[in-house]
């Protein structure tokens, strides 16, 4: 399996910038906005590279259910989990829970990315669409990091100032 490790140059500067925000501002929410905005080029590239079946696929666990074509592509989003919130992060990839759970088809993204064993007959070939998307979009994502952080910082600061003017310190 190939893992991707990223060292974003300027991440410490972005962190220092966000720590300058007033204490009333939720740091987790600010980081979530930053990652959501900054990951858009990666999501777009992943959706372009995701394979789309020619027709609806029968759900293996329950043959009476169908997985609509294009579901894998549609399930690629930025999302956060309880674990990723601990370090102000998130994930980009096929969403497995919620709207895309089981018969909706988001669960098979890893099978497509890495391949999988099909019974006793053999393995399916891996189609690393997320890896390809990362190689296409990583330059844009890394380059836009500081610009996106400044945009979020000014937006949050304006919102905080408006809230203080309207409600005073009781607004939080």
Image: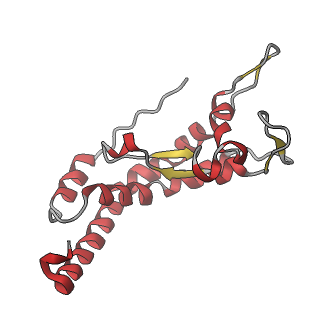
- In the shown orientation, is residue 41 left or right of residue 106? left
**Picture colour scheme:** secondary structure
- In the shown orientation, is residue 34 left or right of residue 169? right
The location of residue 33, given as percent across then percent down, is: 37, 60
**Residue 146 visible to an observer of this rendering:** no
* Residue 94 location, quadrant: top right
* Residue at 32% in and 66% down: 152
* Residue at 50% in and 57% down: 40
Residue reaching furthest to the top: 120
The location of residue 65, given as percent across then percent down, is: 81, 45
Quarter of the picture containing the N terminus is top right
* Residue at 15% in and 77% down: 170
Q: How many marks?
A: 0
* Residue at 69% in and 34% down: 112
Q: Would you place residue 172 above or below residue 7 in this image?
A: below
**Residue 46 visible to an observer of this rendering:** yes
The location of residue 125, given as percent across then percent down, is: 74, 26
Camera-side residue of 63 and 144: 63
The location of residue 154, given as percent across then percent down, is: 26, 71
Camera-side residue of 130 and 167: 167
């Amino acid at each position: 399996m190939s893992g991707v490790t990223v060292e974003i140059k300027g991440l410490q500067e972005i962190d220092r910038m966000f720590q300058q925000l007033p204490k009333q501002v939720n740091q987790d929410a600010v980081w979530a906005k930053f990652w959501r905005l900054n990951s858009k080029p990666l999501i777009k590239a992943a959706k372009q590279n995701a394979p789309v079946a020619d027709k609806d696929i029968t759900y293996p666990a329950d043959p009476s259910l169908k997985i609509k074509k294009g579901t894998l592509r549609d399930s690629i989003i930025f999302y956060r989990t309880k674990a990723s919130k601990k370090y102000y992060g998130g994930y980009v990839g096929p969403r497995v829970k919620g709207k895309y759970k089981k018969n909706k088809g988001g669960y098979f993204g890893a099978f497509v990315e890495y391949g999988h064993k099909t019974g006793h007959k053999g393995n399916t070939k891996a189609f690393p669409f997320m890896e390809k998307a990362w190689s296409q979009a990583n330059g844009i994502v890394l380059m836009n990091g500081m610009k996106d952080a400044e945009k979020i910082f000014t937006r949050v600061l304006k919102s905080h100032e408006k809230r203080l003017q309207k409600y005073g310190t009781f607004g939080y």
